[in-house]
Image (spheres, helix red, strand yellow):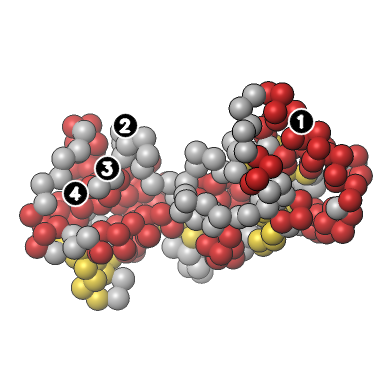
Amino acid sequence: MLHRQKALLSILQQVGGQATTLQLMKWAFLLGQETQSHGGKTFYQFIPYRYGPYSFTLNRETDTLVRNGFMEKAADKVWQLTSLGSEQEVKLPKAIAQDITAVTQQYGNFSGSALIDTVYANYPWFTVNSDLPGQRREQRPVADQAIYTAGYEGKTVDEFLNLLMRSGIRRLIDVRYNPISRRYGFHKSTLKRLCNALDIDYQHLPGLGIPGSARVDLSSTDSYVALFKEYRCGLSDRWDNLQRAMSLLKSEPSVLVCMEANPECCHRTVLAQHLMGMMELPIKHLG
């Protein structure tokens, strides 16, 4: 079991074994924001959602805890520990365990509405998508027109989507040839669904990707140079795809997305440079 999943069990154990989804989300968020340990190096990241900070990853992993018999649904949007979960000895690094205790002692008796009020007052960014009337305390930014690029490598889907929202991006252009991923949230169908939930348009342009077979044996700088040279030379034959990309980039603040964190190791940079010559827009790499 991951440390972050153990942290959820520990939180529930310390608040009496039961909580709403909203409460669990907010307690986890406060653990990540207001403690020295931040819940650990791989703890949940959050995006602004309907009632403040929300983690798609946390929501998915509650399902994992249910499948493993530690939690169950007591009612709609109410979680409770099973006997297995209540009796489970949760072993966490001392700093994380102490911080969980501090958060539950300070906020454990707060209702969902009280937690929303507290978080909204102290973290206004997370109100930008709020469904509560009159509670949006910040406006969602809109990026200047440019050719933005981003890679999700090393990020959770929540961290990545939060980066796009803070950067003012309204459209994600997936330029992976084959948009599958073992990392939760980055498979095409899931990423499209999560983007739509945040009012980010998702578009997939596989014709601007590089097949995986061409990426085998990329073990040196020379091999990357050769691959990207071949890709650059072939872009003139992808006119329809380039036209589509230009249209999307012009109509909404958009980002070209692939996996690699380092833009110098990704074909999206070659693509962006080619589009820059056609559109006379600057390139901006996010993250």
The label nearer to you, 1 versus 4, is 1
Please provide percent x and percent y for residue 152. Answer: 56, 43
Q: Amino acid at mark 1?
A: Ala
Q: CA distance from mark 1 to mark 4?
A: 51 Å
Q: Is residue 237 above or below residue 83?
A: above
- Name the residue that disc number 3 marks: 3
Label 1 close to label 4 by CB (< 8 Å)? no
Label located before the other in sequence (3 or 1): 3
Label located before the other in sequence (1 or 4): 4
Label located before the other in sequence (2 or 3): 3
Say what secondary structure mark 3 lies in.
helix
Label located before the other in sequence (3 or 4): 3
Q: CA distance from mark 2 to mark 4?
A: 17 Å
Q: Residue 36, which numbered label? A: 2
Q: Nearer the viewer, residue 114 or 154?
A: 154
Q: Is residue 201 left or right of residue 115?
A: right
- Name the residue that disc number 4 marks: 10
Q: Nearer the viewer, residue 114 or 30?
A: 30
Q: CA distance from mark 3 to mark 4?
A: 10 Å
Q: Is residue 104 left or right of residue 44?
A: left
Q: Nearer the viewer, residue 208 or 28?
A: 208
Q: Residue 226, which numbered label? A: 1
Label 2 close to label 3 by CB (< 8 Å)? no
